Amino acid sequence: MNDTTTRQDSAGVIRDLAFRAAGPHLIEPGCIYTLTGPDGRLHQVDLTADQYLEFPQRKRGTTTVRDVASFAQYHKKHADAHSEVYADLDLATVTAVLDAHRPAEAEGDDDFARWQQHRLIMELQLTQPWQDWTGNDRRWMTQLDFAEFLEEHARDIDPGGKVTSADLLESAQHFQAKLKVAFTSGKRLRDGQTQFEHIEQIESAGRSAPDRGTIEMPSEFDLAIMPFEDCAPRPVAVRLRFRIRDDKSLVLGYFMNDPVRIAREAVSEVVGKLEAECGVTVMHGRPA
């Protein structure tokens, strides 16, 4: 063993003995420490994270609610004079940035930036009736499917509209009773009804004879449904549509009058309620 190797080994032994001889030191949370390990390298210990502290350094996180009352309760508890609220009418969401940036109070003041990590979001929920009606909008259905759909959703008919739910149910029953007839034509009458002409073969005394008849149904009717859970019912005009196929079968459908606009108006209504409840001015858009 040469002198160089002997000196290196001796230095290592001295270093290890010195490290072991060093007594324990109290390391307090909230600070950053550097120390030299037994390998001679410099190590850093960061105890500034929230999990090392008795309390977090600031509020952070995202809370999601479904209605104005819940939004207002949380907002009043955590918001301050500089919190911001944004609404997205297309996504049906309202977002509050509770720790938004503060304005600069004076030239050179740099104590106005904040983390923008404490947020409150209201996600409006579509009602089941709205999903059912918009889901079948402009979709062709057989007589039976159309009749059953009307029966299941008769409660959504506007009681103050042009047509009552009883009128639609009566039409649905007629369609259910005439599943095996051949439809020849359909036309809109002056009184606002659509009339369907059909032929049914009647067997009598061994002979088959055609029996002609008609079915009438309102060409237009009105709904009164809530697009979202936290808004008032809104009137929606609906127009009847039909097609007679080559095999003389009838398919039916309906067109809702501008459901996208109606949904946006419903979100605007909820935003207005929120502004009144929270005492804030809501900006339209999305926060950074």
Image: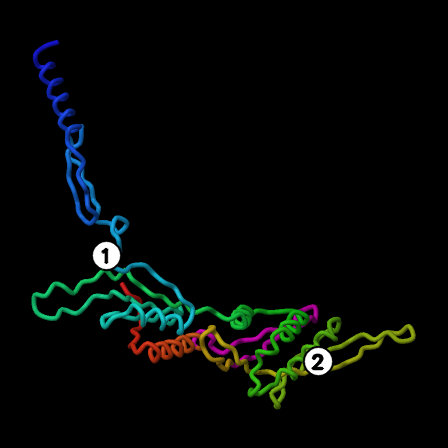
Work out whether residue 243 can be spotted.
no
Vertical side of 188 occupied by 76: above or below: above
Please tell me in which quadrant of the rendered image residue 165 appears. bottom right
Marks 1/2: CA–CA distance: 76 Å
Q: Tell me where residue 82 appears, x and y as whole percent.
A: 22, 70
Work out whether residue 103 can be spotted.
yes
Query: Which of the numbered marks, if any, corresponds to residue 86?
Result: none
Q: In front here: 183 or 164?
A: 164
| Residue 205 placement, left or right of 121 | right
What's the amino acid at mark 2?
A: Glu
Q: Tell me where residue 205 appears, x and y as whole percent.
A: 92, 75
Magenta span of residues: 237-261
Query: Which of the numbered marks, if any, corresponds to residue 57?
Result: 1
Are the residues tagged 1 and 2 within 8 Å (C-beta)? no
**At x 23% / y 60%, what residue is drawn?**
115
**Residue with the mark numbered 2:** 197
Q: Nearer the viewer, mark 1 or mark 2?
A: 1
**At x 34% / y 65%, what residue is drawn?**
120
Q: Tell me where residue 176 appears, x and y as whole percent.
A: 71, 74
* Image colouring: rainbow
| Residue 58 placement, left or right of 19 | right
Q: In front here: 151 or 275?
A: 275
What's the amino acid at mark 1?
A: Gln
